[in-house]
Amino acid sequence: MDFTLSEEQLMIQQAARDFAQTELLPGVIERDDAQKFPEEQIKKLGELGFLGMMVDPKYGGSGLDTLSYAIAMEELSKVDASSSVVVSVNNSLVCWGLETFASEEQKQKYLTKLTTGEMIGAFCLSEPEAGSDATSQKTTAIDKGDHYLLNGTKNWITNGGTAGVYLVIAQTDIEKGHKGINALIVEKGTPGFEIGPKENKLGIRGSDTHSLMFNDVKVPKENRIGEDGFGFKFAMKTLSGGRIGIAAQALGIAAGAYELALKYSKERKSFGTEICNHQAIAFKLADMHTEIEAARLLVYKAALDKDNGNNYDLSSAMAKLFASKVAMDTTVEAVQIHGGNGFVKDYHVERLMRDAKITQIYEGTSEIQKIVISRSIIKQ
Ligand code: CAA
């Protein structure tokens, strides 16, 4: 497998790196502290084409491949995972899901606005009692002829307060189990649709996470994505690609923490020398560098599988499982290398450590990735 980046991919990498330094870094600590959504930054990312990276230009997208998207996700996440999660959800869960499975009318109506950042999207699968066990949907979408009547609660929804459009997974026919689930497009402001308070989170505090309540919400039939009963497969297929974005986010968090730790270790002195000259620190740096490179290869492999038309359920699950562990391990060690300074906000690594944790939880916990991986290898 050839992992050499093309001229175009190198340009995207540089553009994302520059954007992270000039637009995301200023104020990142304050936004985290205040749980402030990066509104201006997301608007600019939309204008630059980072919100619909893989979408056909005829819908306002950038027409790039998955590898370019993963590369951009890594660079943005080195600096600000609260912003990069918005990029990831909008690109992989919302835009990709709509471009691949929605009708032409739905694409014209929604996708063209989502790719440019005129509005952002949310993906609503998780519920108070259906997080990992995604087939146990309690939200119902009862068929009423020309519309569905939507009732229930969704939890931990990224972009929950700021989205303009929500892809909501709900049970239409309980007798049919997962084959009775539908995916519906719900617009903000539809009567009966309420947004709960913003969650107060450990990490990615700038991102906007809410519960959502649906009370007799009328959703027109034409807002269903795909055939009747396609909703669960829609969610699973979409999440397979989403996991590449989150794996790239985890990789970026790890790489960002490593770069800070390497720099710090070359400046900070103890016992008469820079601390990188102590084997205790040098060996940590060696482990970090090796693990990050391994994570990057898994992320690139998953992205290339998707770009080459191969099945990527297994490779995306492996990339997410591994990269999120590397993110956690690397950020903890980056704090350790920074010593007392690592424990204060100004040095960024404590935030990266807090941000890393969610990559082992959302878009399928690490335990869920192991289910996907083990089922896949046993089946082979
Ligand atoms: N592609 C297509 N179809 C798939 C699929 C995939 N990747 N994975 C499963 N399916 C199909 C199966 O083939 C099966 O269909 P058939 O009966 O027709 O064969 C059907 O879906 C049910 O599959 P399973 O029997 O394997 O279902 P399960 O109940 O055992 O659960 C699971 C499988 C993998 C554990 C799944 O429930 C899962 O992925 N859970 C985690 C959900 C998740 O990732 N939640 C994250 C929330 S979203 C989020 O975090 C977004 C955010 O805001 C950041």
Image (cartoon, rainbow, N blue to C red):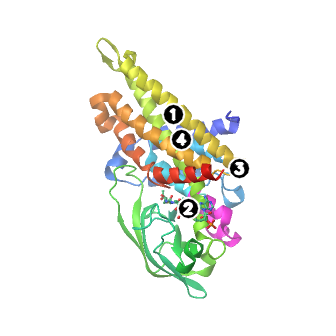
Q: Residue at x 56, y 44 (%)?
A: 319
The three-letter amino acid code for the residue at tag 2 is Glu
Residue shown at 46% from the left, 52% from the top: 367
Residue positioned 66% across, 50% down in the render: 380
* Residue 161, image x, y percentages: 42, 64
Calculate the distance from the C-alpha at mark 4 to the C-alpha at mark 1.
11 Å
Say which amino acid is labelled 1: Ile
Q: Marks 4 and 3, how far apart in space?
A: 22 Å
Which residue shows up at 46% across the image and 27% down it? 287
The reply to whether discs 4 and 1 touch (Cβ–Cβ < 8 Å) is no
Which residue in the protein does label 4 denote? 74
Q: Can I make out residue 51 in this image?
A: no
Residue 52 drawn above or below residue 80: below
Is 219 on the left-hand or right-hand side of 158? right
Of pointers 4 and 3, the one earlier in the residue sequence = 4
Q: Which residue is mark 2?
A: 118
Q: Secondary structure at mark 4?
A: helix
Amino acid type, callout 3: Asn
* Distance CA(mark 2)–CA(mark 3): 33 Å
Mark 4 or 1: in front is 1
Q: Position of residue 263 (x, y in %)?
A: 42, 25
Q: Residue furthest left?
A: 340
Q: Which residues are magenta?
A: 92-114
Q: Which residue is at the front of the view, 14 or 284?
A: 284
> What label does residue 292 carry, if any?
1
For marks 1 and 3, give the one nearer the viewer: 3
> As rendered, which of 35 and 23 lies closer to the eye?
35
Residue 42 is a magenta residue:
no
The numbered mark at residue 310 is 3
Magenta stretch: helix, strand or loop mostly: helix
Q: Secondary structure at mark 2?
A: loop
